[in-house]
Amino acid sequence: MTGPELKRSVGDAVGAAQDVARQAQVVRERVGPPPVAGEGRRVRTSVAAAADSLRSLAAYGRTMNPNFSVSIPTTGSPTGQLSAEAHYRSSARGHERPERTFATAEAARAHSREEDAASRALFMLRYPEARLTDSTATRVPRAGELERMADDVRGWFGPGVLGRSVAERFVRTPPVVTGETQQYFRLVAATNGLIGQTVALQYPGTNHIAVDAEGIFEADRYPSEAERRCILAHEMFHYSAMLGGGYSLRWRGPNGEPVFREVLSWLHEGMTELHAQQMTRGRGHVPPTVSYAAETTVSFYLQQLVGADVLRNAYLTGDLSEVRRLVDRRLGAGTFEAIADAGSGASAFFYLRGRLGERGMPASLASWDRDAIVRTAGVVEEHREAEEERRGAERDPNAIHGSR
């Protein structure tokens, strides 16, 4: 963005913020004596907070760093601010229990049959000439072995891992794992637009986890029991986060205003895999691979910056406010939102490494890069090799350099 364009953009944002702040003032003045005085005070306080937030945004726009473009979010009306606050509080409460629960594997398999029938019907609408059979009609030979392993992994989860509140919900409606056919997962992937070969699914709103009981035992894909256990732990962490409200990632901004991001699934997956890897390794099983390599590495860096307990609580509840505060305190205001706005684990990885270097933390970074999970993920090594190749090309006088 050029200087004049940036100036116009900031000016527009400041003007919009000031307009909405004036609207907030009008709304605040029109709040009359309510039936309940306490509720009226809360309404007026919330509207005042919205106005203060918008004024702060306007001030921030005037001093925005021209060397790093930061998009200013649409603030909306004071009514919208109050609606966002209500959404934030609702999300923070989590779920007392799933909408649909299954007490046994057999009951959960009935759910698999429903999902399979729905997927086949949708697939047939797209491809009428297809001839699909019921992929749940036969029992996978090693499904029982997988389900027994899941019983063991489920025992790893308790108050020490989940905290008392989520652990109580976990015990009340524990996750039920079923082993399904590979065809089942291929059909699910085809009808849901999933990329790659899906091997496990935690169905949102239920306590059902379905696992590809054929693919997960293929030696060329998952050669060790440690990987299978890590996959099960990964899906059970997803379920735990659903119980705690962690599916909705959000935080409070500098003035206490609620902030949401639509696309933060990459961070959720990274934190899920990090916790699954650490739990599995802590039980003596060492997976030879790490899923979501860049996302998991970024999550590990965040864990080192804010502490394991803070990150785990944020993951389980979805409330990243304390993570934002601590990251910004160590790496400078706006750093956390820049990470959240990166859009992918890879982009966040490059940004965060650069930020750590700028803040004089190369020694800490070097220590973190020696962690077994980070080394197994391999993203740091790939980054170093790419940097070496780039520097080599710069040193080579015969190298061809593009220009624009």
Image (cartoon, rainbow, N blue to C red):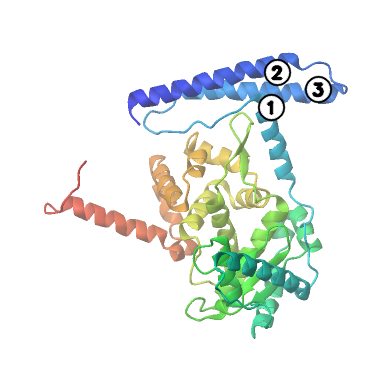
Residue 41 place in picture, x, y as percent: 79, 22
Pick whichever, 369 or 39, lies toward us: 39
Residue 285 visible within the image: no
Residue 113 visible within the image: yes
Q: Please tell me which residue is depicted at 76% across the width and 65% down the height of the picture.
A: 174
Q: Give the image quarter of residue 229.
A: bottom right
Q: Give the image quarter of residue 78.
A: top right
Q: Earlier along the polypeptide chain: callout 2 or callout 1? A: 2
Crowding at mark 1 (Cα within 10 Å: few <14, some 14-19, many 20+)? some
Q: Mark 2 touching mark 1, by CB under 8 A?
A: yes
The residue tagged 1 is 79
Mark 1 element type: helix
Amino acid on which disc 2 is placed = Val
Pick whichever, 162 or 70, lies toward us: 70
Looking at the image, is mark 3 or mark 2 nearer the viewer? 2
Q: Please tell me which residue is depicted at 71% across the width and 69% down the height of the picture.
A: 114
The residue tagged 3 is 40
Amino acid on which disc 1 is placed = Thr
Crowding at mark 3 (Cα within 10 Å: few <14, some 14-19, many 20+)? some
Looking at the image, is mark 3 or mark 1 nearer the viewer? 1
The residue tagged 2 is 27
Quadrant in the picture for the N terminus = top left
Residue 383 place in picture, x, y as percent: 35, 56
Distance between the Cα atoms at labels 3 and 2?
13 Å
Amino acid on which disc 3 is placed = Gly
Q: Mark 3 touching mark 1, by CB under 8 A?
A: no
Distance between the Cα atoms at labels 2 and 1?
9 Å
Q: Please tell me which residue is depicted at 56% across the width and 66% down the height of the picture.
A: 189
Q: How many marks?
A: 3
